Image (spheres, helix red, strand yellow):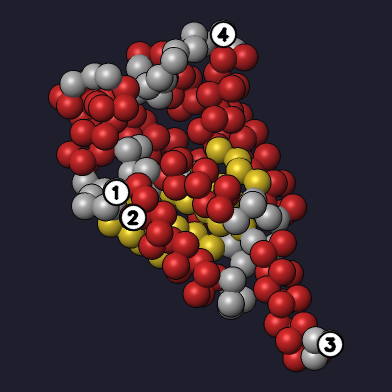
Amino acid sequence: MLSTRSIEPRRRRESKKENLVISVCGMAGSGKSTLAKTLAKKYRLKFFSGGDALKALALNEGFRPLDYGWWESEEGLRFLKTRSGDQRYDQKVDEELLKTADEGNVVLDSWTMPWLLKRGFKIWLEASVEKRAERIAQRDKMTVMEALQALKDKEKQTRMIYRHLYGFELGEDFEPFHLILDTDNLSSNEVFQVLCLVIDKTVLSSAVL
């Protein structure tokens, strides 16, 4: 027969996992989407991507889909300009993200939730613009110079959107984050292993939810 002392810690761990909210953030090419998906699979959590939700809104508005590299394409940058002039797109997606976070048991791939969400474990993946451009060039079948220019255009507009909408500086304000990890010299698997260790040792055994 199990003692009460052995049952209660397990119940507390299960309760924390049921209420777990993890926000993964980082500039394009930092590996945030890959990490968020693998963490969700590892811990059997839901996954919600703010970028995917915004892209779905764009396609519903008549923007053309692409097989890869949509956000760095002319189509993606054109939608970025549309968002700059109409805050409803971002507000609608962020409302959905907050609603999903309230339900718990989720990993959020989002540029806004670390600032808007008052709960959860918040991760920032840091990477140099050169390394991020290399990753995007390989992923989206473009040159590194093309990727660098696309990143500069995209990130200038994106920072402006969030500065005007919410008042934070994306990529410069790290106050909300519990963990900042430099991914320049780490593989995606190494990043995943580090984060699993942190989550297992701190998040699931503490009150950081």
* Residue situated in front as seen by the camera: 196 or 98: 196
Q: How many marks do you count on the picture?
A: 4
Q: Are marks 3 and 2 in contact (CB under 8 Å)?
A: no
**Mark nearer the viewer, 3 or 2:** 3
- Label whose residue precedes the other's in the sequence (4 or 2): 4
Q: For residue 21, what is the image quadrant?
A: bottom right
Specify few, some or many for label 1: CA neighbours under 10 Å numbering under 14, 14-19, or 20 or more.
few
Specify few, some or many for label 2: CA neighbours under 10 Å numbering under 14, 14-19, or 20 or more.
few
* Residue situated in front as seen by the camera: 116 or 73: 73
Specify few, some or many for label 4: CA neighbours under 10 Å numbering under 14, 14-19, or 20 or more.
few
Coordinates of residue 153 in the picture (x, y in percent): 28, 27
Amino acid carrying label 4: it is Gly
Coordinates of residue 118 in the picture (x, y in percent): 60, 62
Q: Which residue is mark 1?
A: 187
Q: Is residue 167 left or right of residue 47?
A: left
Give me the residue at 26% from left, 52% from top.
186
Distance Cα–Cα, label 3 vs label 2: 40 Å
- Label whose residue precedes the other's in the sequence (1 or 3): 3
Q: Are marks 1 and 2 in contact (CB under 8 Å)?
A: yes
Distance Cα–Cα, label 4 vs label 3: 62 Å
- Label whose residue precedes the other's in the sequence (4 or 3): 3
Amino acid carrying label 3: it is Met
Amino acid carrying label 2: it is Glu
Which mark, by number, is residue 1? 3
Q: Which residue is mark 2?
A: 190
**Mark nearer the viewer, 4 or 2:** 2
- Label whose residue precedes the other's in the sequence (1 or 4): 4
Amino acid carrying label 1: it is Ser
Coordinates of residue 142 in the picture (x, y in percent): 24, 19
Which mark, by number, is residue 62? 4
